[in-house]
Image (cartoon, rainbow, N blue to C red):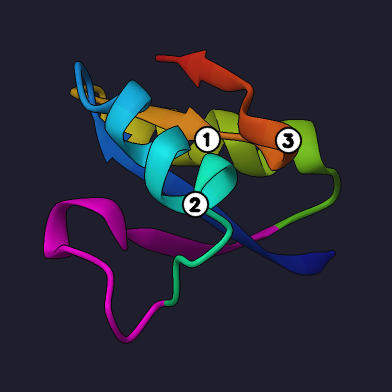
Amino acid sequence: MGKFKVAIVKRGQEGRWRKYWITSRLGTADAAPCALERTEIVEAATVAEAVETVQRMHPDCTVMLAGGEDQSA
């Protein structure tokens, strides 16, 4: 088992998240609006298992994957 840091955003805010973290390239955790800086650290055997765990924890959120892809719960 390993620890995974999984980024999440309220559903409907995915475009704003991508613009801040991916497109602007200026995004920093210290300057991020609070709605765009949410993460969960979970123990899991795989990334897929970590994503599933976070989706269960936050059904009203979208998991934001590397590269700006998202995975809705």
Q: Amino acid at mark 3?
A: Gly
Labels 1 & 3 near each other (Cβ < 8 A):
no
Establish if 33 lies above or below 35.
below
Q: Amino acid at mark 2?
A: Trp
Question: In which quadrant will I find the C terminus?
Answer: top left
The answer to if 13 sits in the magenta stretch is: no
User: Where in the figure is residue 13, as x and y percent of width and height?
Assistant: 22, 27
Establish if 1 lies above or below 50.
below
Lower sequence index among marks 3 and 2: 2
Q: What whole-number distance in Å separates the C-alpha atoms at marks 3 and 2?
A: 10 Å
Q: Which residue is the site of mark 1?
A: 64
Q: What residue lies at 31% left-to-right and 62% top-to-bottom? A: 37
Q: Which residues are magenta?
A: 29-43
Establish if 33 lies above or below 14.
below
User: Where in the figure is residue 65, as x and y percent of width and height?
Assistant: 64, 35
The answer to if 35 sits in the magenta stretch is: yes
- Binning the other alpha carbons within 10 Å of mark 1 as few (below 14), some (14 to 19) or many (20 upward) gives many
- Binning the other alpha carbons within 10 Å of mark 3 as few (below 14), some (14 to 19) or many (20 upward) gives few
Q: Which residue is the site of mark 3?
A: 67
Give residue 62's quadrant in the image: top left
